């Protein structure tokens, strides 16, 4: 214990050092007579307690021994202005990065540098997304629109005990606004650049003495803002229309509660727009004359996605015990098609031409999910004792069936006919038993611990039905089966230094089940098992300690922690290369270490500021692991070895060392129940590697994006009209790349602005 106390002193000192910099007295300072007099005239602005369910119970965020950030409904409303999808959360909390090579349909989450760059539709991710207590395993389910939510919680570090497998990096939890016994709701309408329309709203209230309901819906649309200068099948890109709805019914009995949920999403828009030769050779900057509003491409581009699902969350009260049942069903159907070479033809266009430059060979493909279903069931029993010890235990079942279609097209032939078709099928079944407990050793010291046993089985097969001009011949099925078990666990302690300051320490082990990948259309004819690859289970052990404090009579709140994790057999994927392969691998070890800071404070009664910051230093440790380099003329800086390039010592891909975010809201009273306010938010992410290997061209530059909102609210917040801007500096960055053909990249969202009106009742 002496070692733990010694290590915890530094975060404690930093928290108080931060506190000392703020321009008002602390809760530990004696009040001056002037301050006392002023406090009698008007109550000072204070922060409300943040309630979270990170431990499957409702708790104050300050009492939870986990590095956690909570994003409120108001902040979500601001960040989502302009019709942005879930990627707007990237860098908005410490250690969180989100990117996509599919656009709005398929977000990839990274926490503390741990994620998965795999773009296949059965890819597993070490960051689990939980929507209304139901895991969203398929990457196509993870992009469900953000609307009518109570909050989002981001839990960093392994969460396997209570949330199961595939959570070694952390969990992102979405909690919908629930039905209430009072009639209430809201409507919100905005209009902005590129003929952008956004609507969302909700209405809910009692249906009877026992039943209540809430209906929520959203619709977003935007016109194409990128022109195609080539007379191809598409005139423009980056437009979309998207809709989603959620219906909830709540039954409240004497000792029984049921929350029923139905939800649906429809997306019709542009797949990720790949732009050929936009990167200056020998650098990571745009080529001279780059115009983000124009492309020249001969491929078909579209993204279609439909998802729907339902859940039943039941709770029975039996005196000192509560029994929970959570049943979930999810399904998705999609087809995304894009011009992967990012241009047209396969010829060199010299200086003076407006085309996309050298295209070694044409590549146009599509991936579809014609059949998908996911079923989950959890039973959990929890105690509700008045004494020092409480516990919870349960069982969990998961089953997912997937069929994936992969197509290749000949964009050099009029009509872009199909020229290749492969099918993948995967059945994944898992079950688990788990238990956790907490014990109040004293009034100040609380211990927690938990354990989970998981059995996970996958049956995978892939076949080539029509061979592509390059890749595996007609054949199959190529089969892989995995069957593994694992024990995950965690142990933590919380020490209350006083009523406002808690220190905590936590150690946890997480687990990700084996993964299988089979992009056969791009595999060499002599590839083992037709080109199907698989990666064994990965295990993570994470250590963290930190401090959480309420300061200055609840006018400020701070959380700070340091962490380190070690990964054994980390699953990684070698994406791209000269043959556009996608091969799963296991790295012997990888490590990460750093710190995270969350700060929220009223600097004055009218000025609320939040600050988030994180540092993550990741490293791959495998002296015998090599991956192919690019096939498109990049400058690889790793040492060449047999089999490609050594990645030993490289950072993990899409793992920024630094993430910073800042928000500030200043309100000016304008009479009874009215306010004029200004809200600004900024997010910074340092450089990242796009791939496992390091190269000059495929290293994304740092990004800094800001937003601004100026609004007027009246009738005590029931009505609000605001002008908003997103990416107000119009910063343009390459955020991802394709490396097999040429120096192809894709970029961030452009500046947008508009006006928004909200009415609540």
Image (cartoon, rainbow, N blue to C red):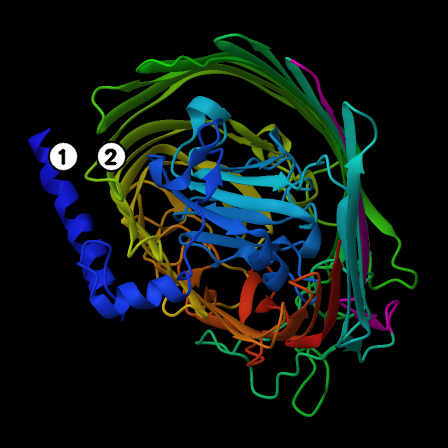
- Residue 114 vertical placement versus 13 (above, below): above
Nearer to me, 715 or 13:
715
Could you tell me if residue 652 is visible in this image? yes
Q: Which residue is mark 2?
A: 505
Is 236 colored magenta in this rendering? yes
Q: Position of residue 422 (x, y in %)?
A: 76, 37
- Image x and y of residue 572, in percent: 46, 41
- Return the residue nearer the eye: 657 or 184: 184
When the figure is inspected, residue 430 is found, relative to residue 153, above or below; the finding is above
Which of the 4 image quadrants contains residue 544?
Answer: top left
Front residue (pair 703, 623) = 703
Disc 2 packing (10 Å; few <14; some 14–19; many ≥20): many
Write the residue at 59% across / 67% down: 745
As drawn, 596 above or below 463: below
Q: In percent of the image, x 69 and y 60: which residue is there?
A: 272
Residue 649, horizontal then vertical, whole percent: 28, 50
Could one spot residue 686 in this view of the protein? no
Q: Is residue 26 left or right of residue 190?
A: left
Displayed quadrant of residue 85: bottom right
Q: Which residues are magenta?
A: 232-254
**Distance between the alpha carbons at the discs numbered 1 and 2:** 8 Å
**Magenta includes 597?**
no
Contact, CB < 8 Å: mark 1 with mark 2?
A: yes
Sequence order check, earlier mark of 1 and 2: 1
Q: Quadrant of the N terminus?
A: top left
Q: Which residue reaches farthest right?
A: 415
- Mark number displayed over residue 4: 1
- What kind of secondary structure does the magenta stretch mostly adopt? strand
């Amino acid at each position: 214990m002496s070692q733990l106390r010694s290590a915890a002193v530094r975060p404690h000192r930093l928290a108080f050092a931060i506190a000392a910099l703020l321009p008002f007295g602390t809760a530990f300072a004696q009040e001056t007579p002037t301050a006392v007099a002023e406090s009698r005239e008007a109550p000072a602005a204070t922060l409300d307690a943040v309630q979270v369910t990170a431990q499957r119970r409702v708790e104050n965020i300050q009492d939870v021994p986990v590095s956690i950030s909570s994003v409120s409904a108001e902040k979500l409303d601001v960040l989502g202005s302009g019709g942005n999808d879930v990627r707007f959360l990237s860098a908005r909390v410490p250690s969180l990065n989100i990117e996509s090579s599919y656009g709005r349909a398929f977000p990839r989450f990274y926490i503390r540098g741990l994620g998965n760059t795999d773009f296949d539709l059965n890819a597993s991710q070490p960051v689990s997304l939980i929507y209304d207590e139901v895991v969203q395993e398929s990457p196509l389910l993870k992009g469900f629109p953000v609307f009518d939510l109570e909050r989002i919680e981001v839990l960093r570090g392994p969460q396997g005990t209570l949330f199961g497998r595939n959570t070694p990096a952390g969990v992102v939890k979405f909690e919908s606004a629930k039905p209430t016994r009072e009639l209430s709701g809201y409507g919100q309408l905005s209009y902005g650049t590129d003929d952008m329309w956004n609507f969302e709203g909700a209405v809910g209230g009692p249906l009877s003495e026992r039943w209540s309901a809430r209906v929520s819906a959203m619709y977003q649309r935007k016109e194409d803002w990128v022109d195609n200068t080539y007379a191809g099948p598409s005139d423009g890109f980056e437009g979309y229309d998207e809709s989603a709805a959620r219906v909830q019914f709540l039954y409240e009995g004497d000792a029984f509660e049921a929350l029923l949920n139905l939800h649906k999403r429809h997306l019709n828009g542009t797949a990720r727009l790949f732009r050929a030769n936009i990167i200056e050779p020998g650098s990571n900057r745009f080529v001279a004359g780059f115009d983000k509003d124009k492309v020249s491409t001969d491929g078909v581009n579209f993204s279609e996605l439909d998802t729907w699902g339902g859940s039943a969350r039941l709770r029975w009260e039996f005196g000192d015990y509560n029994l929970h049942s959570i049943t979930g069903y999810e399904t998705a159907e999609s087809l995304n098609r894009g011009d992967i070479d990012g241009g047209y033809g396969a010829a060199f266009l010299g200086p003076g031409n407006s085309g996309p430059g050298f295209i070694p060979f044409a590549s146009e493909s599509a991936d579809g999910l014609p059949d998908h279903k996911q079923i989950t069931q959890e039973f959990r029993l929890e105690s509700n004792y008045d004494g020092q010890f409480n516990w919870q235990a349960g069982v969990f079942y998961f089953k997912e069936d997937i069929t994936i279609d992969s197509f290749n097209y000949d964009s050099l032939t009029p009509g872009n006919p199909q020229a290749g078709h492969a099918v993948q099928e995967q059945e994944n079944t898992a079950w688990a038993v788990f238990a956790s407990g907490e014990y109040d050793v004293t009034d100040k010291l609380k211990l927690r611990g938990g354990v989970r046993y998981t059995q996970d089985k996958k049956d995978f097969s892939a076949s080539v039905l029509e061979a592509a001009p390059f890749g595996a011949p007609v054949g199959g099925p190529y089969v892989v089966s995995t069957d593994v078990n694992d024990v995950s666990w965690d142990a933590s302690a919380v020490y209350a230094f006083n009523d406002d300051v808690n220190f905590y320490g936590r150690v946890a082990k997480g687990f990700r089940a084996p993964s299988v990948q089979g992009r056969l259309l791009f595999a060499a004819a002599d590839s083992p098992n037709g080109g199907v690859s698989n990666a064994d289970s990965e295990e993570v052990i994470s250590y963290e300690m930190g401090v959480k404090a309420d300061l200055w009579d609840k006018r400020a709140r701070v959380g700070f922690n340091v962490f380190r994790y070690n990964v054994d057999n980390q699953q990684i994927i070698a994406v791209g290369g000269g043959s556009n392969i996608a091969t799963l691998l296991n790295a012997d070890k990888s490590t990460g270490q750093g710190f995270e800071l969350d700060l929220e404070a009223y600097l004055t009664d009218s000025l609320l500021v939040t600050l988030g910051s994180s540092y993550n230093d990741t490293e791959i440790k495998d002296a015998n692991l090599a991956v192919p380099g690019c096939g498109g003329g990049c400058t690889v800086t790793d040492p060449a070895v047999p089999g490609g390039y050594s990645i030993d010592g490289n950072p993990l891909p899409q793992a920024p060392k630094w993430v910073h975010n800042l928000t500030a809201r200043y309100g000016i009273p304008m009479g009874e129940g009215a306010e004029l306010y200004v809200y600004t938010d900024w997010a910074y992410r340092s450089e990242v590697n796009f791939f496992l290997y390091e190269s000059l061209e495929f290293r994304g530059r740092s990004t800094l994006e800001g937003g601004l909102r100026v609004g007027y609210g009246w009738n005590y917040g029931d009505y609000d009209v605001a002008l908003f801007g997103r990416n107000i500096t119009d910063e343009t960055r390459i955020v991802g790349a394709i490396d097999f053909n040429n120096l192809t990249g894709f970029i961030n969202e452009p500046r947008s602005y508009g006006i928004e009106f909200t009415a609540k009742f």
